[in-house]
Image (cartoon, rainbow, N blue to C red):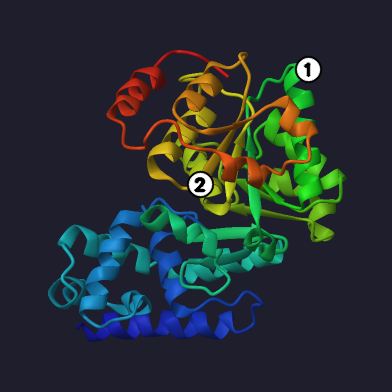
């Protein structure tokens, strides 16, 4: 290893550790290496390592009996010749290594705004997200009581444009959720999700808001409930991030991983995120789905035809619980029926809107 390179890296690491001691936000060295390489918390044009790339790096580090934290001080020669990485990945890591001093300032800035950070290497990382396997987010930023995400959670998803009937149905669903004591997880979209969140919080319930963008706007909007420990806002992206369609779809996936069931109030075939996530969920089995029985939404009709559990207006008025509806449901169509896959592909590309 080049002596100058080693001393330079050692100086960066020692300086970082000295300043890091003064921070309330404490992360393991493995987490710091992960955030440095893969996180988007550092404003930089240097591309982060992708989740798939990191998983391959992890495997090679494990084979070499090395911890992820050690990657911050490795030269290109070490990364390629000892760890066994390809030149392209090694050079990406080298570029990210140079951002180590910037990582401290990024974390310090988040701490000053009461934003916490956790990773897959931390004990406080939500265990429910691990059900997603290789798709789980590597890094999560949050504000509020993170333990709210550890409870028995349920999500509510539906159209962003609501008519009077959909508004009424959503409120009735929230009454049942409140009575049964669930923590609600939503993604913050307008319409059904926003109504579900506000209803839950005003009814003194607890909630998780998992966003993909504009986190600080949501913090200002719901600061009262964060301070009351009734709400935690989470993101797998930079808290300063703007809208990105890929991040938005990934966020819906993460929500599925966090809940024991997802309630779908309304969606049209091929219409957007709710439909896309529902179909993904059927094939990947992240969580169970409970679909509102209505003729007003083509997606609801199709999801029920595909064997998803469903509920009626009568169920909402009855004493039967949401868990009982799910447990009593018998799958009509086998999950591996190829006709489901074929029909879904064509339905998904139809040009309809929620």
Q: Which residue is mark 2?
A: 287
Residue 340 falls left or right of residue 281? left
Above or below 254: residue 27 = below
Give neighbour class at mark 2: few <14, some 14-19, many 20+ (Cα, 10 Å): many
Q: Quadrant of the N terminus?
A: bottom left
Q: Could one spot residue 198 in this view of the protein?
A: no
Q: Percent position (x, y) of residue 135?
A: 40, 52
Observer-nearest of 306 and 158: 306
Instruction: Tell me the quarter of the image containing the C terminus.
Output: top right
**Relative height, residue 19 to residue 57 (above, below):** below
Q: CA distance from mark 2 to mark 1?
A: 29 Å
- Residue drawn at x 74%, y 49% is 219
- Above or below for 237 versus 165: below
Q: Secondary structure at mark 2?
A: loop
In which quadrant of the rendered view does residue 78 lie?
bottom left
In front: mark 2 or mark 1? 2
Q: Residue at x 74, y 16 (%)?
A: 163
- Of the two numbered discs 2 and 1 on the same chain, state the one appearing first in sequence: 1
Q: Helix, strand, or loop for circle 1?
A: helix
**Residue marked by disc 1:** 164
Closest to the observer, 115 or 64 = 64
**Residue, x 36% and y 56% (percent of image)?**
134
């Amino acid at each position: 290893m080049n002596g100058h390179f080693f001393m330079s890296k050692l100086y960066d690491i020692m300086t970082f550790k000295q300043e890091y001691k003064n921070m309330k936000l404490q992360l393991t060295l493995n987490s710091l290496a992960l955030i440095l390489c893969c996180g988007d918390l550092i404003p930089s044009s240097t591309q982060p390592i992708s989740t798939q790339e990191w998983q391959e790096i992890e495997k090679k580090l494990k084979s070499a009996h090395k911890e992820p934290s050690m990657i911050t001080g490795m030269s290109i020669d070490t990364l390629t010749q000892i760890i066994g990485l390809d030149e392209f990945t090694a050079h990406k890591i080298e570029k990210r290594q140079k951002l180590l001093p910037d990582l401290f300032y990024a974390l310090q800035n988040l701490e000053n705004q009461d934003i916490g950070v956790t990773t897959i290497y931390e004990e406080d990382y939500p265990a429910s997200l691990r059900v997603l396997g290789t798709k789980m987010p590597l890094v999560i930023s949050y504000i509020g009581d993170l333990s709210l995400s550890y409870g028995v959670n349920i999500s509510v998803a539906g159209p962003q444009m609501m008519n009077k009937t959909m508004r009424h149905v959503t409120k009735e669903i929230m009454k049942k959720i409140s009575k049964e004591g669930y923590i609600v997880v939503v993604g913050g979209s307008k319409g059904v999700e926003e109504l579900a969140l506000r209803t839950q919080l005003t009814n003194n319930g607890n909630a998780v808001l998992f966003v993909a963008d504009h986190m600080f706007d949501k913090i200002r909007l719901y600061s009262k409930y964060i301070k009351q420990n009734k709400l935690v806002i989470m993101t797998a992206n930079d808290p300063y991030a703007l809208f990105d369609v890929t991040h938005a779809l990934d966020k819906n996936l993460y929500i599925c991983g966090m809940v024991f069931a997802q309630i779908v109030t309304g969606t049209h075939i091929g219409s957007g995120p709710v439909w896309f996530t529902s179909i993904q969920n059927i094939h990947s089995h992240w969580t169970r789905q409970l679909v509102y029985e209505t003729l007003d939404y083509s997606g609801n009709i199709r999801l029920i035809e595909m064997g998803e559990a469903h509920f009626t207006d009568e169920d909402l008025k009855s004493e039967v619980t949401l868990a009982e509806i799910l447990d009593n449901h018998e799958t009509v169509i086998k999950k591996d029926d190829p006709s489901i896959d074929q029909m879904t592909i064509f339905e998904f590309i139809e040009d309809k809107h929620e």
